[in-house]
Image (spheres, rainbow, N blue to C red):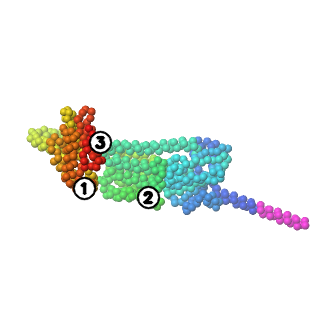
Amino acid sequence: MIFGSRSAAICTQRHLMRQLHTSFYCFVLCWFFLGLGKAHAAQVDVSHWVDAGQVSQTALSLSPYIAILEDPGLKLTLADVQRQDVATRFKSDFASVAALNFGYSKSAYWLRVAVRNTANTPVERLLEINSPPLGLVDLHQPLPDGTYGTFATGMTRPFATRPYANRNFVFPVSLRAGAEHIIYMRIQSTNPTIIPLKLWTPAAFHRYERDDYAVQAWYFGMAATMILFNLLLFVGLRDLTYLLYINFVTCFALSMAAQNGLGKEYLWPDSSQWSNIAATALYSLAALALGMFMRRMINTRRVIPKIDLFLQLFMLVVLLSPIGFYLNYPVFIRFAALMFAAFALTILATSILCAFKRQRSALFFVAAYAVLLLCVVITALRNSGLLPVNLLTQNALQLGSAIEMLVLAFALADRFDVMRQERVKAQQEKLEAQNSLVDSLRASERLLENRVAQRTTELQHLNYQLEALSATDSLTGLANRRHIDAVISSEWTRASRSGQTLALAMLDVDWFKRYNDHYGHLAGDECLRQVAADLKTTICRTTDTVGRYGGEEFILVLPNTDGAGALLMADRVCSRMQALALPHAVSEFGCVTVSVGVAAMIPNDETGPDTLIKQADEALYQAKERGRNQAVLAPQ
C-alpha cells in the first residue's frame, strides 16, 4: 500500500511537471509571436514626451513607432489585422524617414502605432497626416469600453467627414491615464501614397496651423496680385499675351489649391471623383495654358514655324488628357506622367532654341521656366519615392511657382517697356509724317480749295439724307421711335403754351406673336407694312403724326384733339383694320385686328409727356383685357 501510494504520488508529480513545462513552452511561444508582431515598433510614451519639453514647440514624428502592413487585395478589415497570424506580418523600423512614401500603389496600407500615457491624468492630442491627396483615410482608435471608434475620411469623401476642419487630415486622440492605446489606420489612394504622420498637442498644432495657412494665403495672394496686375495691363494695352499669362497663373493656382487640400476645403467640399483627379486635371490645363503663353510670348509661329506646328499638336493631346483622368485615372496617370515629362522638355527645348535665335523674351522665359521645371522634377521624384519628404520637396511646386511668377513679371514688365518705346517711336514717325503732310497741304492749298468746297456741298446733301433716314422706320416708312418722341415733346411744349388739348392713340396688333409663329416673320413684316399703309390713309390732318413705336406697336399724335375726338379716330382705325380683312388664322376674329388705347390732356407744369404716354399705354392694356379689336379712352 505504501509502495502503491508512493507510485501514485510520483505519477502525480510527473503529471504536474509536464503541465508546468507545457505552460512554460506555451508562454515562451506566445511571447515569441507577440515579439514578432511588435518587432521594432516601440511605444510612444506621451508622458515622457511632455516632460522632455518638446511638445510645446514641435510635433513628434511617429515614423519610428509605426508598423506597416500592405494589403494588395484590399480585403483586410480591422478585425483581420488584429488577429495574431496577421499581426506578425506588420513591418516596422522607419526611424530614418520623415514620411512613409509608397509612390503610386494599388494596395491599401495598414498602419499600427502604440501610444502609452503613464501620467495620472488623461491627455488630448492631435494626429496629423500632412498629405491632402490621399483618397481614403480611416482611423480606428480604442474607446473606454474596449471597442474601436472609426473616423472615415479622405480626399474622395466629403470634407464634412473630417473630425477637424483642416486642409490636411487631423484626428483628435484621447489617451486615458495609465493606459496603452493601439491605434490603427488604413490608407488607400490612387495618388502617391505619402504618409507623414505627426502627433501634436492642441496648442502647438494651432500655432503651426496659423502659420501654415498664412503661408498659403501669402502664395495665393501673390498669385491674385499677378492676375490683377496683368489684367490691368491687358485692359490698357489690349495685348493677348497678358490674358494668356492670367490664364496660366489661374490654372496653376487652382492646381496648387487642389494639391494642398484648399480646393477640397473651400471650392468643392462635397465632390468625390473630381476631388481625386482635380490636381492632375488642373495641372494639365496649367501645362496647356503655359504652352499657349509661351507661343505668344516668344512668337514661335514666326521664329520656328515647323516646331510651332508640332507644339500645337502636342498641346491638343494635353488638352484631351483630363478625359483620360476621368475615365480611368489609375491607368492613365502612368501614361500621363510620361506625356507631361515629354511636354515639359519640349517647352524647354523650344524656349532655349528661341533664346539662341536672340529672341529677347525667350531669355526671361527660359530663366523662369527652368526654376519651375526643376521644382516639378523634385515633386515627381518625391511622389515616386526617390526623394525624401521634407519641407523643400513638399513645397517645391509652390516655391518654384512663386519664383516663376516673379521672373515672368519682370519679363512682362520688360515687354511693356519695349512696347512703350515702340509706341513712342511710332508716334514720332507719325508726327514727322503729319508735319510733312501739313507742308504739302500748305503748298497746294489754293489748288484744293475748289475741291474742298465741292466735297462740302456733297457732304451736306448726304447729311440731309441721313437725317431723313434717321427719323424714318425702315420697315414701314413711318416715323420711328426717335422721331415720334421728338414730336410728342414738341407738341407737348406747344400745347402747354397755348392751353390746347393733346391726344395720343397707342395701337397694338392683336395676337401678332401667334401671327408670326403661324405665317413666319416675312409674312409678319408684310402685315406690319399693310397696317402702316392703312394708318397713313386714315390720318387726314397734316398736323397729325403716325409712327411705329416698336415691334407691332404704332402711335398717333393728335394735336388740338380732345378725348372724344381721339376715341372717334381710334374707333375708325379699328373698323378700317377689320374691314381690311387681312387673314389671321390663329386670331379669334379670323383676321388682323388692332387694339387702341387713347389718352388726352391739357399739358401743365406738374406733368410731362411720359404721363400722357403712360395713360395711353394703360388704356391699351384695358382694351386687350376687354377682348381686343376695340379702342378704350383713359379716364380724364
The stretch in magenta equals 1-20
- Viewer-nearest of discs 1 and 3: 1
Residue placed under numbered mark 2 in the picture: 326
The amino acid sitting under disc 1 is: Gly
Disc 2 secondary structure class: helix
Q: Is residue 612 left or right of residue 78?
A: left
Q: Please identify the quadrant where the C terminus is shown.
A: top left
Please name which of the two marks, 2 or 3, marks the residue nearer to the observer. 2
Of the numbered discs 2 and 3, the one sitting upstream in the chain is: 2
Q: Amino acid at mark 2?
A: Tyr
Question: Does residue 78 sit above or below 543 in this rendering?
Answer: below
Badge 2, how many Cα within 10 Å: few under 14, some, many 20+? Answer: some
Q: Are marks 1 and 2 in contact (CB under 8 Å)?
A: no
Question: Quarter of the image holding residue 17?
Answer: bottom right
In the picture, the quarter occupied by the N terminus is bottom right
**Dot 3, crowdedness within 10 Å: few (<14), some or many (≥20)?**
few
* Disc 2 to disc 3, C-alpha distance: 46 Å
On the image, the x and y values in percent for residue 584 come to: 24, 55
Residue 24: quadrant of the picture: bottom right
The residue depicted at 25 percent of the width and 57 percent of the height is 585
Mark whose residue sits in front, 1 or 2: 1
Q: CA distance from mark 1 to mark 3?
A: 70 Å
Label 1 SS: loop
The local secondary structure at tag 3 comes to helix
Rounded to the nearest angstrom, the CA distance separating label 1 from label 2 is: 59 Å
User: Is the residue under label 3 in contact with that under label 2 (CB below 8 Å)?
Assistant: no
Q: Residues within 10 Å of mark 1 (few under 14, many from 20)?
A: few
Circle number at residue 420? 3
Q: Is residue 19 magenta?
A: yes
On the image, numbered disc 1 is attached to which residue? 590
Q: Position of residue 571 (x, y in %)?
A: 21, 46
